[in-house]
Amino acid sequence: MSLLSADPAAFPAEPPADTHDPAVTAAHDWAAFSAPDEMTDHWARPGWSDGSRAYYWMLTFPDAQGLATLAGHCQEELAPLGLDPVPTDGLHITLARVGRPGAVAPGQLDGLARDAEALLPSAFSVRATPLAGSRGAVRLSLGPWDPLLRLHHALAETGSSAGLAPKKPTSAFRPHLSLAYNNRRRPAAPVVEAASGLRALPAVELTVATVQLMELRREGRTYRWDVRNTVPLGKPTGTHGEDHDHFFAERGRPGPTIRRLR
């Protein structure tokens, strides 16, 4: 089973040629970021007006000083552009949407967290590399994608079994970590040029040992959240998702194979 596919609603629309090599995913992100002529207003997205709330699976890094330092430096250099910087305590990787309050009961959230723990892959680390972006944000590239795709797939499996399938399938998941959001329509070239000057900065390593089920909300031109559940990942006893594949094999169905395009 292939985890990734082309999706015009995703950014980048095409998956990278190799999800295991951080250099390949970073180059792929940069090529996609450099292509558009215009950037869009991140805050004009339908369904996310000020005060909106929804439950999401997310990764946060409150103790990652290296990430905070890198983010702060990049944001300072980008400040003349007037982007909306992500606060240090708001840095995150969005994984999968669960649903909106009112449509998902608290008991369903607790059950989802319990079910997820049995399916989650082992703890892992990823590299956050400066700098790329999308039509509406400037962001760090992540790599390798493989463990993040496995994690997303496990959460999607859990949600589907509970009747809470994520809005976007794993095939459209493009891992990233946003540093600043664009707040108006503008030519892309000045933002791309400013970001290009920061691409030589060293990457930082991020440890992923837990995943959080959040109630995410928009406050003006930033995101805040309340943690509803924190679920630990397994202890790393194998490589490249061996424990996760073993889980699927025990249940009589194949584990996901990470797609590498050649």
Image (cartoon, grey):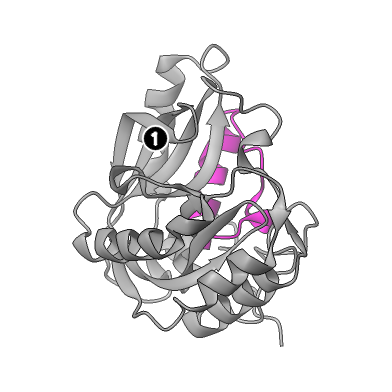
Residue 217 locus on image (x, y percent): 46, 27
Q: Do we see residue 44 in this rendering? A: yes
| Residue 250 in view in this figure | no
**Residue at left 31%, top 66%?**
70
- Badge 1 crowding class, 10 Å Cα cut-off, few under 14, some 14 to 19, many 20 or more, is many
The C terminus, quarter of image: bottom right
| Percent x, y of residue 233 | 31, 53
What residue did someone put label 1 on? 213
Secondary structure under tag 1 reads: strand
171 or 196: nearer the viewer: 196
Q: Report the side of 102 relative to 215 (left or right).
A: right
Q: Residue at x 69, y 63 (%)?
A: 188
At label 1, the amino acid type is Leu
Q: Is residue 100 magenta?
A: no
Q: Quadrant of residue 201?
A: bottom left
Residue 221: percent from left, percent from top? 49, 34
Question: Going by the picture, which residue comes out furthest to the bottom?
Answer: 262
Horizontal and vertical percent position of residue 61: 28, 52
Dividing the image into 4 quarters, which one contains the N terminus? bottom right
Give the residues drawn in magenta, as a range: 149-175
Looking at this view, is 234 or 6 the one in front?
A: 6
- Could you tell me which residue is drawn at 51 percent across and 19 percent down? 51
Residue occupying the point 68% across, 57% down = 171
- Indicate whether residue 155 is drawn in magenta: yes
Q: Quadrant of residue 173?
A: bottom right
